[in-house]
Amino acid sequence: MSVVTEKTELVISLAPEEQPIIQAAIELGDWLIAQFEMTDGQVAKIHRAQALLRKGVFPPSDEAYDYALDANGNGLGRSWGILFSSVELEVYSIYKPKSGYVEPGGIVNEAALWHMIDQEDEFIWKVGCLHDQPYDGSRWIDEVSCPEKYAAQGFELDVDMGWLVQTS
């Protein structure tokens, strides 16, 4: 006697207004693949994450994905990316000061970042949880819509495939 089991796919609870955030995350993955030399495994990892995002479901419990664009220059780094596991999808942008970073005007490190914190974005969807209001991802979408602009501003661009590992 054989037993057939079905894997249950857990749907990401997106408001219609949030779909453009997901589309921009997918397009960021395409841009990273087109711009940077990657291993076949790294490309496959982004493609798998994109397929799940397009389908609107969380990865199975044995899979996790992350990819990001890093822009570094003048002692300041910035990242835009996704972290995607079986329990959570996070789309984010963060500032990362390097040691000795001095803001124009002489403010050093953490103190300089306080005004930048308001410019960071973090959108989190968790399995089985709804948030109160749809996220406004317009700034994040705008920032990742043309990554070349950061290179034109003197930032060095790089891909960050993060620390999450796909196990299947």
Image: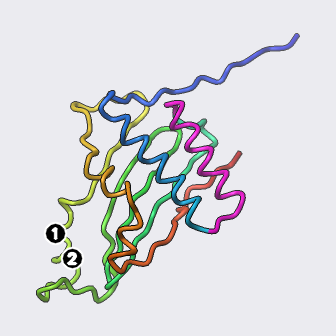
Residue to which mark 2 is pinned: 110
* Relative depth, front residue between 104 and 133: 104
Q: Is residue 18 magenta?
A: no
Mark 1 and mark 2: span between their CA atoms?
7 Å
The location of residue 104, given as percent across then percent down, is: 16, 85
The location of residue 135, given as percent across then percent down, is: 26, 39
The residue positioned 40% from the left and 63% from the top of the image is 147
129 shown above or below 144: above
33 shown above or below 104: above
Residue 80 quadrant:
bottom left
* Relative depth, front residue between 108 and 147: 147
Residue 52 quadrant:
top right
In the structure shown, which secondary structural element does the residue marked by tag 2 occupy? helix
- Tell me the quadrant of the picture where the N terminus can be found: top right
Which residues lie in the magenta part? 37-57
Mostly what secondary structure, the magenta segment? helix
In the structure shown, which secondary structural element does the residue marked by tag 1 occupy? helix
Which three-letter amino acid code belongs to the residue tagged 2? Answer: Glu
Residue to which mark 1 is pinned: 114
| Residue 51 falls left or right of residue 116 | right
Which three-letter amino acid code belongs to the residue tagged 1? Answer: Trp
Q: Residues within 10 Å of mark 2 (few under 14, many from 20)?
A: some
The location of residue 151, given as percent across then percent down, is: 40, 74
The location of residue 112, given as percent across then percent down, is: 17, 77
